[in-house]
Amino acid sequence: MKRVVVGLSGGVDSSVTAHILKEQGFEVIGLFMKNWHDDSVTISNECPWLEDSNDAMIVADKLGIPFQVVDLSEQYKDRIVDYMFAEYEKGRTPNPDVLCNREIKFDVFMDIALKLGADYVATGHYCRKGEEIIDGKPVYKLLAGKDVNKDQSYFLCQLSQQQLTKALFPIGELTKPEVREIAKKADLITAEKKDSQGLCFIGKVRLPEFLQQKLQPKEGVIVNIPSNFSDYTKSVPKFENKQAELEYFSTKYTYQKEDGKTVGKHQGAHYFTKGQRKGLNVGGTKEALYVIETDVVENVIYTGEGKQHKGLYRNVLFVTNEEIHWIREDLTLKVGETMDVEARIRYRQILEKATLYKVENGLYVEFQNKQSAIQEGQFVAWYKNEELLGSGVIS
């Protein structure tokens, strides 16, 4: 009998995951990961980890499977929290959920599971795993979940072949309503439970307050850049080759204070991210202001008026060699090679047509359509026919 350890988070998805595996005849063990317990920044009594671990325990009890809480807060702090602070300080926007899957759930947690003699680790992610024999060896594939509205493959874009070998995603073939239906029939306490928001396993954290613990507030100005800013309208040069063109279009606009007018103050450029609209507290403009760039060195936030502001859009991004990750190692591009894919730069974004260009020092991703608020530090993930092939950190 194969043994599976399920990461029970106290939500409906992981509860149904455990239930399905039990029905399929696996020996199932439920583990709850406690990754964070600094109550000063969680929004009290809204989804504290205690309530979640209780729900997970009740579900395990109902299913008749062993259950235990593992405290991973130290590894979580080292690998996720400290990394987040460092990224925000550099003015980049990290994605803790992607990292949490790579560093915690499918690494630290997986090690614990394997020590418990597990053959597999299962999570309640909406994605599927495929397998194909290529050159006599099994190659694992990460496929989008059947429920298009809930597909979570993006969050797993940093997994490796080794991690996928041991992973199971039992609800990937189901839609969310079907999952709730199964939970109801199985009489699981989590059937009607609302989906958790907020950082992976931290519970509901107020991000600015979370950041303020480490990153000191410092007052700076908000500068509004007009839509006729000279760089937006200058003519495009002639390029010697494709790489020069890609480099040109992947370079972000740079602004000086004198390029626009000062419209307000802020408490620290490192608390803001590109594309952000809330929290600027500047009135008197026709359309809402959006952050188009943050300068953490000079502590200036640059904004533009309206969702269509030119400063928000680019169609090429770059990933350095160190940050390129192929799930399908067999498809890795060599210098000079290209690949037509569909890609996204954030979770929930509809896949967009793009082309990958491998160059000496990294990889360019050229989108057919301009993308809004391309964020350094976030992940770009590329797909072909529902399969996530690889990803990288936007530089």
Image (spheres, grey):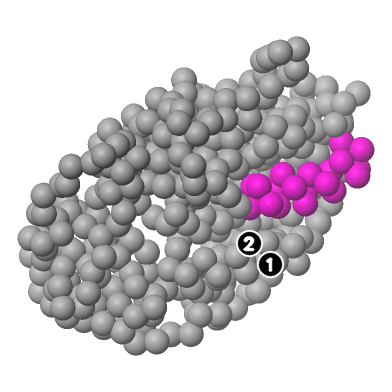
Can you say which quadrant of the picture contains the C terminus? bottom left
Residue, x 77% and y 51% (percent of image)?
A: 108
Disc 1 marks a residue whose amino acid type is Lys
Give the structural element (helix, strand or loop) at label 2.
helix
* Residue identified by numbered label 1: 77
Is residue 117 in the magenta section?
yes
Q: Is there any visible trace of residue 41 in the rendered image?
A: yes
Residue, x 46% and y 39% (percent of image)?
A: 359
* Residue identified by numbered label 2: 80
Q: Is residue 280 left or right of residue 143?
A: left
Q: Nearest the camera: 354 or 213? A: 354
Quadrant of the rendered structure where residue 121 is?
Answer: top right
Real-space CA distance between mark 2 and mark 1, rounded to the nearest whole angstrom: 6 Å
Can you say which quadrant of the picture contains the N terminus? top right
Question: Which segment did they paint magenta?
Answer: 100-118
Residue 47 in percent (x, y) is at 59, 61
Residue 234 in percent (x, y) is at 11, 54
